[in-house]
Every structure is written in C-alpha cells, then in structure tokens.
Image: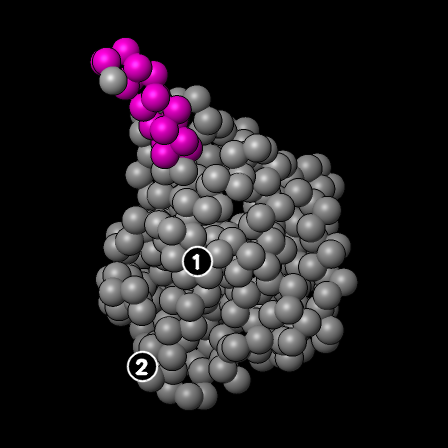
Amino acid sequence: MNKALFFAAAIPVYAVLDVYRFVFWRSRSRLSTLLLDKKGHAEDYYERRDSAADRLREKMHIRYTINSDRGETLQGFYYPAGKKPGKKLVFIVHGYHSEHAETAGMFYELYNSRGFDIFTCDNTASGESGGSIFGYDVFESSDCLKWLDFLRSEFGEDIEVILHGFSLGGATVLKMSDRCPDCVKFIVSDSGFIDAREILKAQLGPLYGIMAGLNRFIAGYDLADTDVSENIKNSPLPFLIVHGTDDKTVPFSMAPRIFGLCPNDKDCLYTEGAKHIETIHLAPMAYEEKLDKFIEKYL
C-alpha cells in the first residue's frame, strides 16, 4: 500500500476514534473541541457558576480519598456547616465534563444556611479524581454508593443524607436510587437523563452503533446499562425532579417520563425557559421552596 492509500484509509479511522474520545474520554483533541464543543448558556450563568466555584474552593473543607472498583483514586470534599461535622448532609453529584466545585458552589449557601454539611466528589475521569473514561451513570453510581458507605463509616450510621445530582449526576442518583442505604432520605435529580442511548443516538446519528460497540470493547460496559427506568420503579425513596423546559442537552421530554416512573411521594419543578441545569440560576426561590418542603417532611 502506498502512502496516499495508507493515509486515505487512516483518516476515517482517526476521525471515528476522535469522536469516541470526544464523547467518552476525559481528554479531547483540540480539533474536536473546536468543532464540537459549544457553549449552552449565556455569559451571566458562567460568571455566577465560576465565581461560586471559586468561593467554595476557599471554604474550609476536609478532603477524603477512596478507590473505585476499577482501581481509580477518587477524591471527595466535605464542607461542614459548623465547626464540627453534623449528622445532616447533602451529597451533591456533578455532571458530565464538570467537577465538584462547579456544581456544589451554586448550592453552598442554600444548604449551609439550613444547617447541612455538604459532601461532593470528583467523579471518575473528572476534576482531581483518576480515570479516563466516563461511565454515563454506570461507573458513577457504583462509585457514589461506595462514597455513601464511606460517609456512614466516617460519621455514623445515623446520618441523614439528601442525594442531589445534576445532568449525568442526576442520572447517577436515579441509577443508585434502588440500592441506597437507609440514611438517604430523598433524591433530587436536576436535568437527569432516563437513558444515555437516547441522547447519544440523537447526537451521533449513524455513528452511534460504532461508538456503542467501541465503548463495550474499550470501557467494558453496555450503554443499555445506563437506563434508569427499573431503578426508579424499584426505589423506596421520594423524588424531586427538576428540569428546564428549554433544555437542549437533556431534552425536557425526559423529565415527565422520569416523574411518571417514580412510585412513591414525588414532586417536580419544571422551569419555563430554563436551559440545562439553569433552574437555580433563573428560579432560585422556587427551587428553595421545593427543597424546603422535602426537608421539612423527610428530615
């Protein structure tokens, strides 16, 4: 094979692998980032998010480390509401290509003012944790269950926990909802998806089958395992489902489907005109009211 033919054959293979890397890996090529990574929010959202994240990083906190079942080192961050760790805490789970402070920062004051310690972690392939490949809720739910076991061993079996997840983190808390220990009192899923396959099929089009096959081979899990439907139906927990009606990342149509599957006490907050995970930015008072009702009832 001459060089021209070799490069002609190599280019589509490289392109496919680069798309896989963009969708599933922590690191992305400059070219794919330039072509495919688009901002989804107005600048005021990013300014608020980033300033809140910076403030959170300056707060006094305790860092913890555990290992995932895959051998990765995972980092967790505990922010006590007072001088001594208490018994009420919220476990905040961040989303895809994010990290703990970007998400927890915007909720620190809300939960801190109500006396809640905050625990949050960098999920696999994110922030300061190890790992290269995202699990689209498969890896993340397993890891967060390990974190719950760690928190119970560290602070006592009598702790009371709110699980609050966003985007991929929202799907993660739904995925683990039927396997949580009794210390978890209710679950908040903000902009969570019901099944990653639906989102990726819409984004990848005819490439989806190739990407799904590559992922089974490289990451070792099937995207069918990201479906949270059965987990929700088998969960004993109350749910608060939050979603923006203008969400283009995780389509709003998923929210009422998730809500319909919840078998127990449940409520929803559907924010008109809000984009992906924007409800706390556009409707903070409505968010606080919904959370306060659940807190009063279950803790």
Between residue 272 and residue 40, name the one nearer to us. 40
Residue 143 or residue 93, whichever sits in front: 143
In this image, 233 relative to 45: left or right?
A: right
Q: Residue at 39% across / 24% down in the picture?
A: 12
Nearest to the observer: residue 162 or residue 58 = 162
Q: Is residue 297 above or below residue 290?
A: below
Q: Can you see residue 296? A: no
- 62 left or right of 52? left
Residue 195 drawn at (x, y percent): 60, 53
User: Which residue has dot 2 on it?
Assistant: 154
Tell whether 298 sits left or right of 100: right
Placement of 257 over or under 230, stated as above or below: above
* Element on which disc 1 rests: loop
Predominant SS along the magenta part? helix
- Residue shown at the point (60%, 62%) measured from the top left: 228
Work out which residue is located at the far front of the displayed protein and give it: 1
Residue 182 rendering spot, x and y as whole percentages: 52, 84
Q: From the viewer's perspective, is 124 left or right of 211? A: left
Q: Which residues are magenta?
A: 2-19
The C terminus appears in which quarter of the rendering? bottom right
Q: Quadrant of the N terminus?
A: top left
Q: Residues within 10 Å of mark 1 (few under 14, many from 20)?
A: some
Residue drawn at x 46%, y 61% as measured from the top left: 138
Report x, y in % for residue 245. 71, 42
Q: Mark 2 or mark 1: which comes first in sequence?
A: 2
* Residue 83 - label: none
Q: Are marks 2 and 1 in contact (CB under 8 Å)?
A: no
Residue at point 38%, 57% (across, down): 220
Pointer 1 residue:
221
